[in-house]
Image: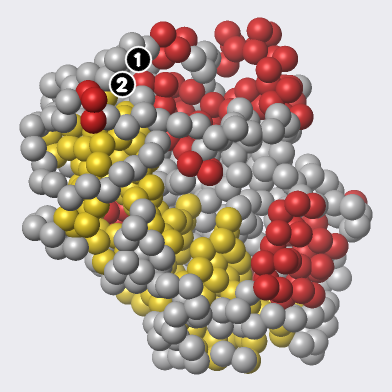
Amino acid sequence: MPDTPAPYSFPSPLPDTALLASSTSPYTTTRRQVLVGGAVGLGAAALGTLGGAEARADSTPRSPRISEPFTLGVASGDPLPDSVVLWTRLAPRPLAEDGRGGMPDWRVPVQWQVSEDERFRRISAAGTALAEPDQAHAVHVEVQGLRPGAQYFYRFRCGREISPVGRTRTAPAPGARVDRFAFAFASCQSYTNGYYTAQAHLAEEDLDLAAFLGDYIYETGDQGEIGRGHHPPREVRTLAEYRIRHAQYKSDGDLQAAHAAFPWAVVFDDHELENNWADDTSYGEDVPPERFLLRRQAAFRAYYEHMPLRRSQRPTGPDLRLYRRLHFGDLVDVHLLDTRQYRDVQVPDADRDDPNRTLLGARQRQWLLDGLTDSRARWNVLAQQVFFSQRDFADGAAVNVSNDAWDNYRVERDRVRDHLATIANPVVITGDVHANYVADVKADFDDPDSATVATELVGTSFTSGRDGQDQRPTDAVQLRENPHIHFINRNRGYVRNTVTPTEWTADYRVVDYVSAPGAPITDRARFVIDAGTPGVRPRG
């Protein structure tokens, strides 16, 4: 979809001749697409149609009168020095059972504006995009020609309806001197597990970026813990069901506020599709790969439709190229990883040392290693999903590690770790485990006296796991068996990070409960990483 900036104020709806048509990029057919194509006739009826009525949509753009189309808010993401992605989705009835948000089967023009001021007196860029029915009337605008390191405000219009205003920020110019970069990271926001109080506090932070590290939705059936809203009684599997689940989460006002406050960089983990899935293999069901890939295709499509991602991330069949890199001047490079789509299946502990096992896949691994080698930034961040450092849960001589984390892919983990030892100031940020951790990444995890080569900061969940607690009795075993782990906490919240050329400060911000709204937020702990000195030190 070409975007042509043109300064103007919102007038009456533009004529159809001014509309900008969408475009798609060509792609190379993969094995997974072949599997899916061969399975459509066999499995589509069982899994839910991916096209159906949408494929027969009227191609003529129309401007219908739609009451309250912006129920899911607005968002921005993936900032570049001259560009940022703007997102919204038209959904006057976001939980409509067909997954189409109560929208007609038409292409709908949506106007957008970007301004340097919140009252939109100085328009920096503007245009019109088409909300397509086969994309759930989601809008992804890649605004070009913006100033580096600048704050902007943005909004959308559909007919006479105007969206909430969002605030975003572009990245600094390539190689520019940057004295401060502030960002937060978080993960795991089960809607039925608690209120989005932490997201409300996050929206009040002064940040350049929020990184969401996975489990944006949960595919599981209703758990019914707190009564603030329930999932349907079974797992979601079809495109319509995934769309409804995303819309349920996106309808939360606190989550909308956090999205509207600053740009996000998002990656998925497992629950956006199914618990603990690996590549083309279901973890919970004995189904053939081609059938599972049909479900994956539906999940990825709904994920893209609800996230502020670029066209280069738009899925092609069951494939979605999510790993990518963001640069913030000379200070920070963020390497966003995908630890689900290319991994080998999980195996028992006895088989985890197979040197051919991969979590990243060969192509992503080489992309990561090359990018780390070529980086000229002061700090290098691996933003990823599952626990990177060794974590032994068993007391004494026995060993018990998580088969869903990097410990199950030990040889590849150690190869990446050894490469981290050769670069400037590496920091791994992680989600998934519903707990806060701080760990030294050791040159040899079995030798506490070996060199520290990097730091891993693990963030707790927003809500998953319900109210949480400071620590569990079993955490003492983890601290004793893993001397490279310095801190464990199991409250809910996020990690706020302030990065300068000389130090990185990580504030572990937590709320005491999510079972009711209104919990205050506090700083549970603060840790500092000094540039040039791997490892952390506490700061009171």
Q: In this view, does 254 lie above or below 178?
A: above
Left or right relative to 206: residue 412:
right
The residues tagged by marks 1 and 2 sit, at their Cα atoms, a distance apart of 6 Å
> Is residue 80 in sight in this rendering?
yes
Secondary structure under tag 2 reads: loop
Residue on which disc 2 sits: 107
> In the image, residue 132 lies at what x, y percent?
36, 25
> In the image, residue 53 lies at what x, y percent?
41, 9
In the image, 231 versus 178, the foreground residue is 178
- Cβ–Cβ below 8 Å for labels 1 and 2? yes
> Is residue 468 in sight in this rendering?
no
The disc label shown at residue 317, or none? none
Q: Residues within 10 Å of mark 2 (few under 14, many from 20)?
A: many
Q: Which residue does the image show at 18% across and 42% down from the upper left? A: 163
Q: Which residue does the image show at 8% across and 32% down from the upper left? A: 12
Report the number of discs.
2
Task: Tell me the amino acid under the disc marked 1.
Answer: Ser
> In the image, residue 7 lies at what x, y percent?
17, 50
Task: Tell me the amino acid under the disc marked 2.
Answer: Arg
Q: Is residue 148 above or below residue 274?
A: below
Q: Residues within 10 Å of mark 1 (few under 14, many from 20)?
A: few
Secondary structure under tag 1 reads: loop
Q: In this view, does 382 lie above or below 323?
A: below
Q: Which residue does the image show at 34% across and 58% down from the upper left? A: 145
Residue on which disc 1 sits: 59
Instruction: Name the quarter where the C terminus is drawn.
Output: bottom left
Q: Which residue does the image show at 8% across and 58% down from the upper left? A: 121
> In the image, residue 92 lies at what x, y percent?
22, 26
